[in-house]
Image: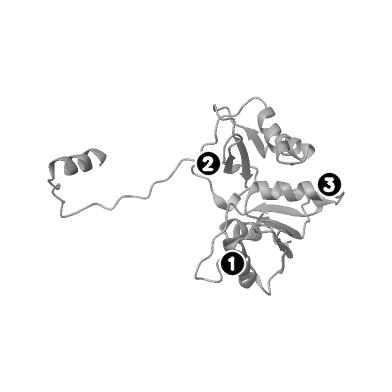
Amino acid sequence: SFTEAVNILAVGHAPVIPNYMAKSEPVKWEFKMPPLHTDIERVKAYLMNRGINEKLIDYLWKQGFLYEDATKYHNCVFIGRDDNGKARYGAIRGISSDFKGDVSGSDKRYSFKISVNNNADTVHLFEAVIDLLSYVTLEIKNCREWYRDDFLSLAGVYVTENKQDIPLALRAYLENHPNIKTLCLHLDNDEVGRKATEQIISALKGQYTVIDQPPKSGKD
């Protein structure tokens, strides 16, 4: 403990180490969403300032995929739901700082996604929710029928030694959406994003049409 550590430094006596230490059970964090604010005025202003389409923001709020928390920070809270509509994941984005994080106990298998068309055969993949919303905003701006496809945030990406590994959110999504035939990857233009793209393509080659569509300029 902190107190024992201070005593060791002050006195110079190490504690007696017991011969046997019981194996502790893994900690199971309760999934509990932050408190709900009555409106999303601060969150809406923040997202619009970042260029996100106003109608898209209103749509997500009304559909229960976005809200403003009632803490003193008034963070953005993006919700990931399972196929029964139950909230299983929460991504928090600070509106007055660079804070980013997941709600404790979040299940990354149910990361944030937009799925309007039940018969969609194409899904667009992004590292973070803001990237996803930015892309949909560009689709709206260019008058494309964006709602024909699905959009999934992977809640971060990683690279492993096992080339068959894919992000947990993507694996769960594909298992629950057998109609998907095409994956469009819009991961970041950095080392992790490029390597993660290569790994996903390698793992799913032959099963799906996988298209690499990174940002034309910049990182994300």
Of 5 and 152, nearer the camera is 5
Of 105 and 98, nearer the camera is 98
Please rate how many residues cluster around mark 2, counting C-alpha atoms within 10 Å: few if below 14, some from 14 to 19, many from 20: many
Question: Which label sits in the foreground, 1 or 2?
Answer: 1
Residue 218 in view in this figure: yes
**Residue pictured at 70% horizontal, 40% vertical:** 50
Mark before the other along the chain sequence, 3 or 1: 3
Say which quadrant the N terminus sits in.
top left
The answer to whether 18 is drawn above or below residue 204 in the figure is above
Which residue is identified by label 3?
A: 141
Residue 63 in view in this figure: no
Disc 3 is placed on an element classified as helix
Q: Report the amino acid beneath label 2.
A: Val
Which residue is identified by label 2?
A: 103
Residue lying farthest to the front in this orientation: 218
Residue lying farthest to the bottom in this orientation: 206
Q: Which mark is residue 74?
A: none
Say which quadrant the C terminus sits in.
bottom right
Which residue is identified by label 1?
A: 195
Of 131 and 179, nearer the camera is 131
In terms of image quadrants, where is residue 53?
A: top right
Position of residue 49 measured from the top left corner of the image (x, y, whole percent): 71, 37
Residues at marks 3 and 1, CA–CA distance in whole angstroms? 30 Å
Disc 2 is placed on an element classified as loop
Position of residue 75 measured from the top left corner of the image (x, y, whole percent): 59, 34
In terms of image quadrants, where is residue 172?
A: bottom right
Mark before the other along the chain sequence, 1 or 2: 2
